[in-house]
Image: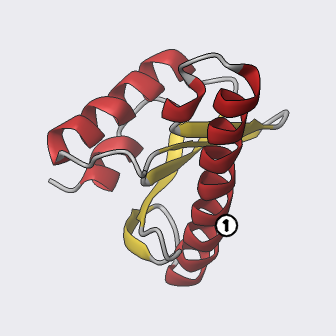
Amino acid sequence: MSRTTELVKFPGVSAATIFSRKGFPDEFAGLTEAEANEMATLCAAITMTVEMQGRMLARMGDRPGWENCCGWMMWGPEQSVLAVRDSACIARAAEVPFKRLVDAMEAQVAEQIIPPSL
């Protein structure tokens, strides 16, 4: 079963995509092709920006750990977007247990053996 199919089974998740570093959807569920393309493009750009900010904070703050930043979240009153490495989900904010969802997304990445970007 695909990673996105597994993610949309998670309580509160309505859509998911796996995206490439170039901003293309590798797979998606709960989205049209046009929505998946838009989501992949935006999520790849934001993820790379967050990774660069993490490296900058690690250098400027002389504190280890920021360089391993691998995800981000944007939440609203009804829906949220959560990204971890190469995957992103749209979730109904009131229904999803975010800590469990992050753990599930990290476990999927670990199973795929996707190294963090350098």
Residue 17 against residue 84 in the figure, above or below: below
Where is residue 84 drawn, in percent x and y? 48, 41
Where is residue 102 drawn, in percent x and y? 46, 27
Type of amino acid under label 1: Leu
Judge left or right: residue 69 versus residue 112. right
Judge left or right: residue 65 versus residue 101. right
- Mark 1 lies on residue: 42
Residue 97 visible (yes or no): no
Residue 22 visible (yes or no): yes
Q: At 60% across and 24% down in the image, what residue appears?
A: 95
Residue placed most toward the observer, 44 or 6: 44
Question: Which residue extends farthest right?
Answer: 77
Residue 27 against residue 1 in the figure, above or below: below
Where is residue 98 drawn, in percent x and y? 55, 22
Residue placed most toward the observer, 36 or 43: 43
Q: At 83% across and 37% down in the image, what residue appears?
A: 76
Local packing at callout 1 (Cα closer than 10 Å; few below 14, some 14-19, many 20+) is some
Label 1 residue SS: helix
